[in-house]
Image (cartoon, helix red, strand yellow):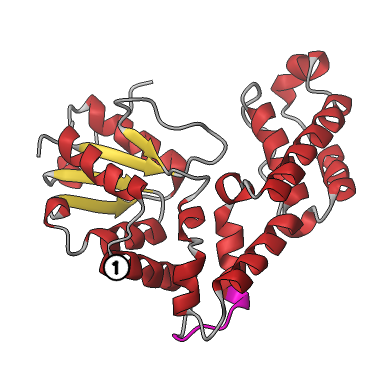
Amino acid sequence: MKLPAIDDAFFRGKALLLVEDPLTRTVLSQCWKMDPRARDITVRPVGGNVGVQRLVMAARELDHRHVFGLVDRDFDGPAGAGAPVLKTGRHEIENHLLDYDVLAKVSLNTSAAAIEQVATARATDLRAWMAVRKTLVEMKVEIPGMPGDPKVIEVPDEAAAKAWLKQQSYPEDAEKIIRTKWTKLHLNDRLPVHYEWCANEVTTGRWFESFSGKEIFRHVRSVVPWRFPLASDEDLAFKVAEHWRDKGTVPAFIDGLRDTVLAGSGL
């Protein structure tokens, strides 16, 4: 379906990068603040993954080739070559911000190892929640309109995750698909598979790439004492990105994002 035209003023600029939220803009803006190569890139938050996707699509239909998007990778793979909507290198932008060495420098005498322990403990607590989310993602591929993700507090363990799935209702127009595949029994069979995968991610340390960084980054912010007053996740993200910029340690995916947007915009 072709989207309605959007006022061209929205798309003004030499290069426009639409992102999901203000935190992402803060990170990119700080990383690129002193970079002359990035001075022509305007970073604008537009409200979530869907908002980014739709606005980039609308821009491309209006032949605005200088408009790009950045979304969290979530459970997807990397963006295809030449795609106008790019993805974070890890599950979410916050996964990249879990830089323990930098966080230790921002903290009030908390070691990198201690902060890593806090983050890993939180990841361990999120195994059931992540397993439910993976089950729902698999389901939503075939049945649009399925239930949204549960709150973390609703699924503290695998038993609670099974109970939560059992309580969910299905869209009425999906009845045929549900009866042939997505039964409650099928969900109960799929959940342990994903739970085992999540448990293995924690055991091997791969959760750092694949789990929801937002939840873990927020937990770290709330537990660790800091040298500065931090009222939000965005405040801590600012400090991490500022350190990356000053020390020349900006993650490769952020530098690559800059280069892709500039090249695609003919700059």
Q: Which residue is drawn at 88% across and 44% down?
A: 163
> Residue 31: horizontal and vertical position, in percent?
28, 60
**Quadrant housing residue 184:** top right
Q: In the displayed structure, would residue 240 be above or below residue 17?
A: below
Q: For the residue marked with disc 1, what is the amino acid?
A: Lys
Residue 119 quadrant: bottom right
Q: Which residue is drawn at 16% across and 35% down?
A: 263
On whether residue 188 falls in the magenta region, the answer is no
Q: Main secondary structure of the magenta part?
A: loop
Residue 125 in view, yes or no? yes
Q: Pick the quarter of the image with the N terminus.
A: top left
Residue sitting nearer the eye, 259 or 165: 259
Q: Residue at x 20, y 52 (%)?
A: 42
Residues rendered magenta in the picture: 222-228
**Which quadrant of the rendered structure holds the C terminus?**
top left
Residue where numbered disc 1 is placed? 247
Q: Is residue 217 above or below residue 82?
A: below
